[in-house]
Amino acid sequence: MSIVEYRRPEHEIAPVFVSRWSPRAFTGEDIPPATLLSLFEAARWAPSARNAQPWRFVYARRGSDSFETFVSLLHDRNQVWACRASALAVLLSNRTIVWEDKLVPLPSHSFDAGAAWTNLALQANLLGWHTHAIGGFDRDRTRQALDIPDSLAIEVVIAIGRIDGKDSLSPELQEREVPSTRLPLSELIREGTFRR
Ligand SMILES: Cc1cc2nc3c(=O)[nH]c(=O)nc-3n(C[C@H](O)[C@H](O)[C@H](O)COP(=O)(O)O)c2cc1C
C-alpha cells in the first residue's frame, strides 16, 4: 500500500502533505550542496510576524567533524538512527527584533520558526528526500558546542536524508517505522465558537 493510500486525507489536498513523514531509516548518502541549499531556501520564504524572519540554521553534513559533534548532542535514543542522516541542522529563532530603532521582543519567534521548518520539510519531500525533527537533545550543550548566542532560542534539530528500507534499523525501531495517522478533522475545527 502506498503512503498516500495509508494516510488517506478526508478532503482533497496536494499529495506532499501526506507523503511527508518522519522516517528513522536513512541511507547515509551524501546530499548535494544544491539540494541542501534548496531546503533552506524554501525555509527562507516562510511567513513571519512583521516579516522578522527570525529563523536561523546551523548545519553539518555527514562525514564532517562537526557532524559527529551534532550527533553527540542528541539523546541516545535519537543518536542511534540520526547518525545515518545526510545532514543535521539546528533550527534557532531570534527572540527579538529591531523595530523603530529599538530592540523589542518577538513573541512569535518559535511559531515563525515552525513555519520555516514546515517549508523545509515539504521542499525536502518534493525533491525526494525526507526530514525528521528531533526535540530530544541537550540544549545547554548545543548552545555551548555550537557557540549559539543567548539572543537565539534553540528550537529543534532536523535530520535530513534519503529514506532507506527499515531493515537497517533495530527490531524495536523497525516496529515504529510506520507513517503516523492524524486525528479526524471533526476534532480539530469548530464553526462559530469553540464549545459545542
Ligand atoms: C518539535 C518536534 C520534536 C520531535 N522530537 C522527536 C524526537 O526527539 N525523536 C523522534 O524520534 N521524533 C521526534 N519528532 C517526530 C514526531 O514524533 C513526528 O513528527 C510525529 O510523530 C508525526 O509523525 P510524522 O512527522 O511522521 O507525520 C519530533 C517532531 C517535532 C515536530
Image: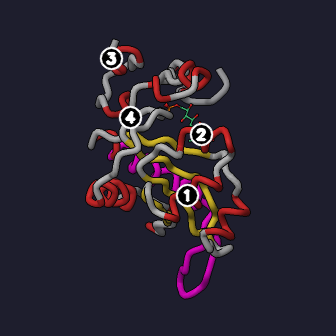
Q: Is residue 112 magenta?
A: yes
Most foreground residue, 14 or 152 = 152
Residue 92 lies, with reference to residue 96, above or below; the image says above
Checking the image for residue 163, the label placed there is 4
Nearer-N-terminus badge (3/2): 3
Measure the C-alpha gap from mark 3 to mark 4: 15 Å
Report ligand 1 position as a quadrant. top right
Residue 104 lies in quadrant = bottom right
- SS at badge 2: helix
Distance between mark 1 and mark 3 Cα atoms = 34 Å
Q: Is residue 48 left or right of residue 104?
A: left
Q: Earlier in the sequence, mark 4 or mark 2?
A: 2
> Which residue extends farthest bottom?
101
Q: Choose the circle earlier in sequence order: 3 or 4.
A: 3
What's drawn in magenta, residue-wise?
95-123
Between 39 and 14, the residue placed more toward the observer is 39
Q: Position of residue 29 (x, y in %)?
A: 35, 46
Q: Nearer the viewer, residue 174 or 187?
A: 174
Residue 142, image x, y percentages: 65, 62
What residue would you read off at disc 2?
A: 80
